[in-house]
Image: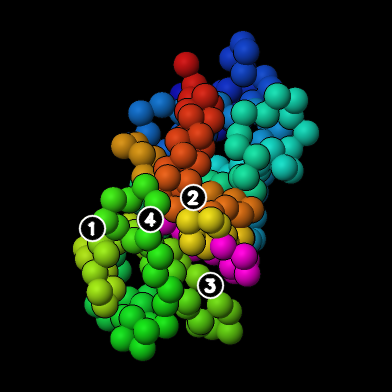
C-alpha cells in the first residue's frame, strides 16, 4: 500500500495549488487552500491557538501581510480557523456557574463594576462593558444584552469582544472604543477566532467585521 501523503503535500501536486497550503479537519464541508503568504504559526498573543494536529490553521491580517490586493479587513491582526469543538464559548450559557469566568462576571455585576451604554442599532438592548482582572492581567469584556436595570446576563446573551483596553474618548453614541480585541465566530462547519486592532464596540460594528472576515476566509475554501 502506498504511504499516505500529508494534505499539504497532496496540495502541492494539484495544479493551481502550488502557491497555497491545504488544511482540512473533522466536520469541515471543504478543505481550505490558504496562500502561503497568509499562513503563520498560531501567534502567542491569540487567546486561543489551533493545535497543529487538528487540521486547523492560523493566518495573519493585511497589516502584517505583503500580499497585493489583500482581501482581509484592515482591522484584522491575525486569526485561526479550526473545528467548532475547539472554539471558545460566545454565549453566557457557555460559561456555567462555578467556572472562573462566570464567577468573575457575577461578582463584577454584584459590585457594579461595569459600564452600560445603549447599543445604537440594538433597539432596546445595551452593551455591558465588564472589567476582568485575573492572573495578573486585565481585560474588558463586551456583552450584548437586554436593557435590564440593574443589568444582568441571560443564557442567550452574546460576548461581542474581549479587549485589552479602552480609549479615554468615546464615540458620539456613547459607545466605548476598545483596542487589542479578540472575537469568536461559529460557522456551520468551522470556528474562526480572530484578533483586531481596535473599534467602537457595538453589535453593528462586530457583525460587519464578522461578515468581512467570514467572506475572506470563505474565499480560501478549496474547489
The answer to whether residue 168 of the structure is visible from this angle is yes
Real-space Cα distance between discs 2 and 3? 17 Å
Relative horizontal placement of residue 128, taking residue 55 as reference (left or right): left
Residue 61 vs 116, above or below: the answer is above
Marked residue nearer the N-terminal end (2 or 3): 3
Indicate the position of residue 178 as horizontal and vertical percent values.
Answer: 57, 61
Q: Marks 1/2: CA distance?
A: 20 Å
- Which residue is tagged 1? 156
Residue at (49, 50) in percent of width and height: 193
Residue behind mark 3: 139
Q: Which of marks 4 and 1 is nearer the N terminus?
A: 4
Q: Looking at the picture, how far across and down is residue 108, in whole percent?
A: 38, 83
First in residue order: circle 4 vs circle 3: 4
Rendered view: 22 above or below 166: above
Quick one: label 2 or label 4, which is nearer the N terminus?
A: 4
Residue, disc 2: 193
Decide whether the magenta segment is chiefly helix, strand or loop: strand
The label nearer to you, 2 versus 3, is 3
Task: Kindly check if marks 3 and 1 are in contact, taking CB atoms under 8 A apart as contact.
Answer: no
Q: Dot 1 surroundings within 10 Å: few (below 14), some, or many (20 or more)?
A: few
Mark 4 surroundings within 10 Å by alpha-carbon count, few (fewer than 14), some (14 through 19), many (20 or more): many
**Mark 4–mark 3 CB contact (< 8 Å):** no
Q: Give SS at disc 3.
A: strand
Q: Residues within 10 Å of mark 2 (few under 14, many from 20)?
A: many
Amino acid at each position: 500500500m502506498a504511504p499516505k501523503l500529508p494534505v499539504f503535500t497532496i496540495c502541492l501536486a494539484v495544479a493551481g495549488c502550488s502557491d497555497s497550503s491545504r488544511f482540512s479537519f473533522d466536520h469541515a464541508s471543504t478543505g481550505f487552500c490558504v496562500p502561503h503568504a497568509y499562513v503563520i504559526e498560531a501567534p502567542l498573543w491569540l487567546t486561543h491557538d489551533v493545535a497543529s494536529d487538528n487540521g486547523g490553521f492560523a493566518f495573519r491580517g493585511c497589516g502584517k501581510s505583503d500580499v497585493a490586493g489583500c482581501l482581509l479587513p484592515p482591522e484584522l491582526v491575525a486569526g485561526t480557523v479550526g473545528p467548532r469543538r475547539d472554539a471558545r464559548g460566545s454565549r453566557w450559557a457557555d460559561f456555567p456557574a462555578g467556572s472562573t469566568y462566570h464567577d468573575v462576571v457575577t461578582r463584577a455585576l454584584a459590585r457594579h463594576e461595569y459600564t452600560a451604554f445603549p447599543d445604537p442599532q440594538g433597539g432596546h438592548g445595551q452593551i455591558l462593558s465588564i472589567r476582568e482582572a485575573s492572573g495578573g492581567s486585565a481585560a474588558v469584556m463586551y456583552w450584548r444584552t437586554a436593557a435590564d436595570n440593574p443589568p444582568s446576563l441571560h443564557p442567550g446573551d452574546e460576548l461581542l469582544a474581549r479587549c485589552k483596553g479602552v480609549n479615554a474618548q468615546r464615540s458620539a453614541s456613547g459607545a466605548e472604543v476598545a483596542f487589542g480585541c479578540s472575537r469568536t465566530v461559529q460557522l456551520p462547519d468551522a470556528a474562526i477566532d480572530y484578533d483586531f486592532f481596535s473599534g467602537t464596540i457595538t453589535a453593528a460594528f462586530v457583525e460587519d467585521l464578522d461578515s468581512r472576515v467570514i467572506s475572506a476566509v470563505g474565499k480560501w475554501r478549496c474547489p
